[in-house]
Image: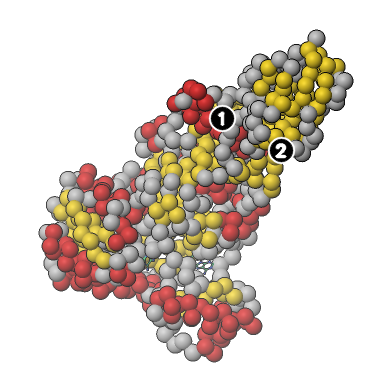
Amino acid sequence: MFTKILIANRGEIACRVAATARRLGVRTVAVYSDADASAKHVAACDEAVHIGGSAPKDSYLQWERIIEAAKATGAQAIHPGYGFLSENDAFANACANAGIAFIGPPASAILAMGLKAESKQLMEKAGVPLVPGYHAADQDPALLQREANRIGYPVLIKASAGGGGKGMRAVDKAEDFEAALASCQREARNSFGSDAVLIEKYVQRPRHIEIQVFGDTHGNCVYLFERDCSVQRRHQKVLEEAPAPGMTPEFRAQMGAAAVAAAKAVNYVGAGTVEFIVEQPPEGGMRFYFMEMNTRLQVEHPVTEAITGLDLVEWQLRVAGGEPLPLKQEELRIHGHAIEARICAETPDNNFLPATGTLTVYRKPDCTAFERGVVRVDDGVREGDTISPFYDSMVAKLIVHGATRAEALARMDAALAETRIVGLSTNVQFLRHVVNSPSFAQANLDTALIPREAAVLFHQDKVGLALAVASAVAQTLVAERAVEAADPFSRRDGWRPHGLTVRRFDFEYLGESLLAHLTYLHDGALQLTFGEVSGVLQFDTLPTEGGARMDLQFQGQRQTVQTWQLGEIVHVFCALGATQITEIDALAHAGVAAADGGRLTAPMPGKVLSFAVKAGDVIKKGQALAVMEAMKMEHTIAAPADGTVAELLYAPGDQVSEGAELLKITTA
Ligand code: ADP
Ligand code: ADP
Ligand code: MG
């Protein structure tokens, strides 16, 4: 085993690799860019080396500097993580030439699998089933068009050097082919520096099922079962699970054997993933075809770890150090079911537009509250960190394990409900909607799941208006009490012996303005009214760090609610979901309707809104006499005793100064 490794990556995967290294007593060296100077992955390693500017091309892709850093720190091996240099055969070669072990496959295997087209020709020879298609070198547009016509529409044009869903174009009919080809080539040239394409039959109702393989330097190769990654947006994975629902032992064995054959065809060593596209023909059954091999550790490897009970990074380190695979095929078993969700900084309701910003609040599900090992969070950020535009938008991976898929599903929903992020938009609520959608819940999986379920996935707000308003009002009162606790002379609980204080709150919710009134009733209860809604608001505060947490009751709903106010926006989280409500002018202030003898005075400078009485009216104690508005709140001025109105001293709309007498009464 190595005694020191360098991790040539950042974010969650760098932290993930560091965790296993630490457990095995292997020292770690981090590398970092300007933007990552105080990143979590730097703190997770024993030493760190600055390698350049924030853009990946100035740092994480600067492989000469990374090899220099390894030499300077005495690291014996480099773990490339995923992305960046992980599938760069020149880098793997450079490591070997520098006498540093590359924790990954031989450069020749990376090269062989790196190009989608060439790898397909190789797989054809190895007897691995392929999607009907064209993947030869001749790129004459007329020939490509003829090939597409031969394959039959719909077809998919892929960038031969592509990855991450980039450059892919589905074409429904021959007339659209030429334009789609040009656009695919353009994107491919910009993203991958090569505009070579391949054409495949567009598989109907496809599922993405991939097989984790592992080879060693002693000629062994095993498969660690499958992952279903069918839930995708723009050909990128959103949720991944293992095992694949509906998989039979026979089909699994066939796919496993094909994956091992694919790996052996390129003398594969280390962790790799063979991606298959699985057709679900209307007549039933499944057929699988090779798509590509990813010659690295995959983002979704934790679901495989969960069901096998293995640490794949440990296997990578052992294999790279020359040890044989720890287990044989027949010793590998599947335990239960695991699901991973990729939590990303993005706006699902706005076409998944990536978001950047600061993780002002970042609370993870309490992994210890569940059975050990059942909920796992892999991340590379801490509260207060920023998600910058330089790197990808993944904030964290949430992985759950259960005895059955149903159990894992319920845990995923609960864990997502407990994930609280404030400061930038994320897909957390969207992921909950996906998990709870009929298709996902019933394992009716294919890559079109998200568009098919769009009606229940986008523009959803499960919290609802009533709870949002109640939470925002309660959170204001909780915040005020905290101020009062620190300063007992600023009591503003609204309780008055003779009057009902009514406070006004201006909100904006889902783009609509709304006015709410909170009345402090004589018995101390709070009546909350807005629009057609009116009810008693009750809440008890619960201990929490930052923000407010309360057991809240309103309109027959009882929820544990957590809120954070950032500027005017109140972020509300509860088991139902999360939402935001804007409290316009959060400056909370309370009024005091003074009542001394026959003089009824204005508690503060403000405006008289209305009188409920006129001169000569007989009044009862507690009866509302006038309403005034001050500091955006309405205050009802009530009769301190039975009596008669003698005179109104102002008219509605008048501005009054503090202490101004509003009306005269004669008490009985
Ligand atoms: P998976 O490992 O599940 O197949 P992807 O194919 O989406 O996941 O890519 C893995 C990760 O690597 C993603 O976070 C992606 O942003 C990143 N990535 C992919 N290609 C590159 C690249 N050329 N340079 C840097 N990062 C990349
Ligand atoms: P990338 O390298 O960008 O990950 P892949 O070839 O792995 O590209 O394909 C990514 C996704 O595109 C798959 O998971 C699948 O959803 C979709 N896809 C790929 N090939 C086909 C096909 N022939 N028919 C239908 N969908 C496909
Ligand atoms: Mg892929």
Q: Is residue 462 above or below residue 194?
A: above
Q: From the viewer's perspective, is the residue at label 1 or at label 2 nearer? A: 2
Mark 1: secondary structure? helix
Q: Label 2 is placed on what type of residue?
A: Gln
Mark 1 Cα-neighbour bin, 10 Å: few <14, some 14–19, many ≥20: some
Q: What residue lies at 56% left-to-right and 33% top-to-bottom?
A: 476
Q: Which mark is residue 655?
A: 2
Q: Quadrant of residue 388?
A: bottom left
Q: Could you tell whether 316 is left or right of 662 in the image?
A: left
* Mark 1 or 2, nearer chain start: 1
Residue placed under numbered mark 1 in the picture: 477
Residue 270 % position (x, y): 27, 59
Mark 2: secondary structure? strand
Residue 33 % position (x, y): 29, 62
Residue 29 % position (x, y): 20, 55
Q: Which mark is residue 544?
A: none
Pick whichever, 606 or 550, lies toward us: 606
